[in-house]
Amino acid sequence: MKFWNKSKLFIILIIALVGCNDFEDMNVDPNNPSQALPDLLLSASLVSVSGVIGATTPAMYVQYFAQTQYTDGSTYSTEQFDFNGWYTGALMNLQTIINSETATPNYKAAARVLKAYFFHMVTDRWGMVPYTEALKAADNFQPKYDTQETIYKGLITDVTEAVSQFETTGSLKGDILFGGDVTRWQQFGNTLRMVMALRLSDADGSYASSEFSKALSAGVIDSDVMYSHLSEDANASPWYSRFITRTDWAITEAMVDTMKAYSDLRLLKYADPAPDYDDGDGIAESFDEINGMPYGVTSPEAGAIQNAAVSFPGAAIRSQNSPLPIYTVAQVHFSKAEAIELGWISGDAQTEYEAGITASWAQWDAGDATDYIAQADIAYSSANWKSLVGFQKWIAAYPSGYEAWAEWRRLDAPVLTPAPAAVNNSKQIPVRQAYPVSETELNQVNYDAAVAAQGPDILDTKLWWDKN
């Protein structure tokens, strides 16, 4: 990734943070956006990517992290989550670029790709959401909810068209992700298309197969797409920022014990040593220095465990300028392994599976993965491809909770034990998030229609693509 001058970047980034722990529901609203320059709107919207890849709630659902003080997130106490910040913030900014009569094709194309990226996250959280009638401002304050099928296929079409819309000779200022590299934007768009297609493998296999193959042929990423943070408070890693005020997210026992069992050296990057087990240098150099936190216990039970007894996220993600992954080469390889097993593309699934593991180890500078891959429970077996790929995707997606949560729901792997102190009615790990209360007050008719079509507005209602 190309870096901008820090002082210039600080000036253009306009951030509004909603919520106490996450960047999840960010609302970026430049003054008079109809007249704002496309580069400023693009930069401000790109900042919100950090909120997607650095969110805590889905990372707790998939048991990357357990809270050490207030365990509401890891016991599923919150049902309703607000999506309004996304609509009035990043999505509206991007729609403004798309609607602009003066924005160049490259700005419009980048805005369409990024809009699809955010909408993909939104629909994977809530399911049916306003899409075709959304982002029309005063023209429609009560948009209808669209089915996930409509949303997904609309997003895939939009990304496909956007990739073709880019002009290799055009400029793209304000691009804090790729530094104006149009080829990288096209690869990013194709990778997003591939990811969305694979998500539909159980819902519409024929369509998914076709779109996956086309995306792959168009050219996906060949190096990791990382969101780079800076060594300044305004643009720091969300994991750095949240630990300034609250030490409350430790690596879970499930994650630690699983990775230790297979001598997975990525754990030494994922976690810092627990102070009680550290040899004194503050660097995890052996598995003995890392200790996991029990997941999903009550706040009093969690409070009885001293912070010094557990491991917190490692410096690789918790430093002020730590980059976080958006899409990785490992994810591409694992996805290709799936597609081969599904009969969508030709190739050798084992080769792609092993390449995915190797790429993930390289991403985290964890050393040689050869011995790890050779272990009986890790070695590839076509008969068990779904559980093997699902397990490796779970390990490799860390700490990106939304992607890991979506793939866990789709592949049903690995097997995760729900929080013992879960407070939701079913006591099961959530498979969606409920709509904000404001929708029942301001958009009642369309809210009711969505619930009637999709199912109860609770954490346990499966999304359209979640068939198993």
Image (spheres, rainbow, N blue to C red):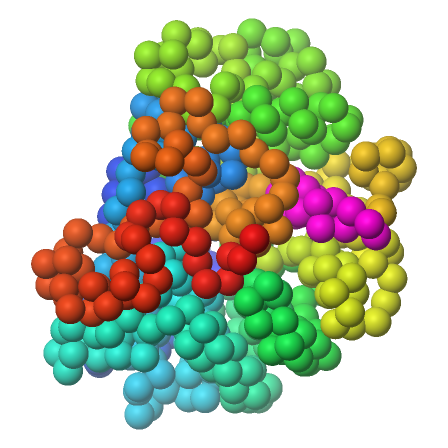
Magenta segment, which residues?
A: 382-395
Counting from the top left corner in percent of width and height, residue 7 is at 38, 56
Left or right: 357 with respect to 86?
Answer: right
Check the picture and name the quadrant holding the N terminus. bottom right
Q: Where residue 115 appears, x then y in whole percent? A: 40, 71
Q: Is residue 354 left or right of residue 23?
A: right
Location of residue 122 in the rendering, given as x and y in whole percent from the top left corner: 38, 60
> Foreground residue, 280 or 278?
278
Residue 246 colored in magenta in the image: no
Instruction: Tell me which residue sits at (41%, 19%) in the image.
Output: 297
Q: Is residue 387 magenta?
A: yes
Q: Main secondary structure of the magenta part?
A: helix
Q: Is residue 236 visible?
A: no
Q: Quadrant of residue 448?
A: bottom left
**Residue drawn at 71 percent across, 50 percent down:** 386
* Res. 148 visible in picture: yes
